[in-house]
Image: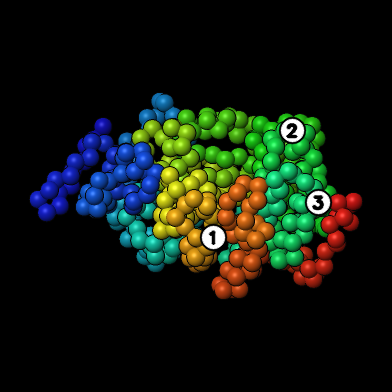
């Protein structure tokens, strides 16, 4: 175990280990302050960032933040590291890596080839010394394309998850939200419902309802009911039409255990979904959601800062070749991301780290009503994510999720971003939408089908 020191104006700042250095180098956020691991002053933060910038990237392979022996996420990250892909940057320090990422040498194709050689800790480290414009500029060069019933992530495209949640899982209410969203061109990433109940029978009912609507309208998209993975697996065993298997994940074994999951269970779920062969264009069958602060909220962060824990969650996601990954960036609350400024920074960090690791990153641009944030903050976050090339955002009626009780992005927000940046939906969905000319049946007719 190494210790680290950096001198600023004759003051020597000492960091006893790598995880402390990471935490002190992280831009300010309430979660790390709550955990008691953040820098005690702006000067200490700068000293930590300067020290981190001088470290070789190979350091993160030699010194895991959470020991290999005690954490399956660490084992996954290190066991799957691609040394050949890493070779082009293996001699670089964190600071040199940042400069290279911003250079013309780091083209889209080069970054795509590099992804298997980058560990989450490398991505997190370099993000800590980057400005917002750096995070945007690099992420915008990276396209990650996935397929199930349509093609997501292409250049010039912005997709949406149509999120028709209802506080009582009422079919008519859900169907009304689906029709509303489809009329605005939302739903090409997925039509995904957060169920009010995790009851297997209720989830199966919703799965059949979504599938009937999809088939009735012949929509080239995929559906998902975002129940616990074990509930979805039981639904598959009972013959339900499951397109994507969803699960919230985190960056430590302990945190994932608090969610009731581990890597073997996720492997089994993916295998079950693949056996159904429901995809027509591809076999990316997993959907993951993450968020800074999840490991800390479960008291399972092992002393690692929340942004690095988040990047480690992407190491988990990458293994399963998902169709969709999104950070629900402001959902956990102000205890972890206090205000609009912290939410904005976290969203761009998460998007950058996920893309650098080769993931199809989306973002739920959101906040809770007790956070020091408002819609202006979310407009800024949404616009900068669009500039950074985010794969997809959420489409919630009115931007107000009446089941989960938080504020997200609306169907209108997606239209704004598409028009502003000249972006279009997934090509197959766009062709379907133009053919129908937004002509959709009434809700009663849709439910009868």
Q: Earlier in the sequence, mark 3 or mark 1?
A: 3
Q: Examine the rendered structure and indicate whether residue 171 appears above or below residue 181.
A: above
Q: Which residue is mark 3?
A: 172
Q: Position of residue 242 (x, y in %)?
A: 74, 41
Depth check: give the residue in front, 34 or 267. Answer: 34
- Element on which disc 2 rests: helix
Q: Examine the rendered structure and indicate whether residue 70 appears above or below residue 292.
A: above
Q: Position of residue 412 (x, y in %)?
A: 64, 67
Q: Earlier in the sequence, mark 3 or mark 2?
A: 3
Residue at far left of view: 10
Q: Which residue is mark 1?
A: 390
Quarter of the image with the N terminus in it: top left
Q: CA gap, disc 3 to disc 2?
A: 20 Å
Q: Which residue is mark 2?
A: 200
- Lateral position of residue 209 relative to residue 320, left or right: right
Residue at far top of view: 69
Residue at 79 percent across and 71 percent down: it is 437
Looking at the image, is mark 1 or mark 2 nearer the viewer? 2
Depth check: give the residue in front, 40 or 94. Answer: 40
Residue at 35 percent across and 61 percent down: it is 131
- Element on which disc 3 rests: helix
């Amino acid at each position: 175990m190494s210790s680290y020191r950096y001198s600023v104006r004759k003051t020597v700042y000492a960091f006893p280990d790598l995880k402390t250095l990471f935490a002190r180098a992280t831009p300010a956020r309430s979660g790390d302050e709550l955990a008691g691991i953040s820098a005690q002053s702006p000067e200490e933060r700068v000293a930590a960032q300067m020290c981190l910038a001088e470290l070789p990237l190979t350091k993160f392979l030699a010194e895991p933040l959470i020991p290999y022996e005690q954490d399956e996420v660490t084992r996954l990250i290190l066991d799957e590291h691609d040394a050949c892909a890493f070779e082009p940057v293996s001699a670089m320090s964190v600071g040199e890596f940042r400069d290279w990422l911003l250079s013309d040498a780091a083209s889209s194709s080069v970054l795509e080839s590099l992804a298997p050689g980058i560990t989450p800790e490398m991505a997190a480290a370099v993000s800590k010394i980057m400005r917002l414009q750096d995070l945007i500029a690099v992420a915008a060069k990276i396209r990650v394309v996935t397929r199930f019933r349509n093609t997501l992530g292409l250049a010039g495209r912005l997709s949406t998850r149509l999120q028709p949640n209802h506080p009582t899982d009422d079919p008519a209410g859900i169907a009304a939200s689906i029709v509303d969203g489809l009329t605005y061109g939302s739903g090409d990433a997925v039509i995904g419902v957060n169920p009010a109940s995790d009851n297997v029978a209720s989830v199966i009912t919703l799965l059949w309802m979504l599938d009937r609507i999809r088939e009735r309208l012949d929509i080239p998209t995929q559906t998902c009911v975002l129940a616990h993975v074990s509930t979805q697996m039981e639904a598959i065993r009972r013959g339900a039409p499951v397109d994507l298997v969803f699960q919230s994940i985190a960056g430590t074994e302990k945190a994932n255990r608090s969610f009731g999951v581990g890597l073997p269970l996720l492997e089994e779920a993916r295998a079950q979904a693949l056996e159904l062969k429901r995809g027509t264009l591809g076999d990316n069958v997993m959907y993951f959601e993450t968020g800074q602060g999840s490991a800390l909220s479960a008291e399972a962060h092992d002393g690692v800062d929340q942004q690095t824990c988040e990047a480690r969650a992407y190491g988990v996601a990458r293994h399963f070749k998902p169709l969709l990954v999104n950070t629900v960036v402001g959902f956990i609350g102000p205890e972890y991301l206090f205000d609009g400024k912290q939410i904005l920074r976290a969203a761009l960090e998460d998007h950058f780290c996920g893309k650098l690791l080769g993931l199809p990153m989306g973002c739920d641009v959101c906040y809770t009503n007790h956070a020091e944030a408002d819609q202006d903050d979310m407009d800024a976050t949404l616009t900068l994510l669009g500039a950074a090339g985010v794969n997809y955002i959420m489409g919630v009626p009115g931007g107000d999720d009446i089941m989960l009780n938080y504020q997200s992005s609306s169907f209108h927000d997606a239209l704004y971003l598409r028009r502003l940046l000249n972006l279009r939906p997934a090509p197959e969905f766009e062709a379907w939408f133009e053919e129908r000319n937004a002509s959709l049946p009434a809700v009663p007719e849709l439910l009868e089908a």
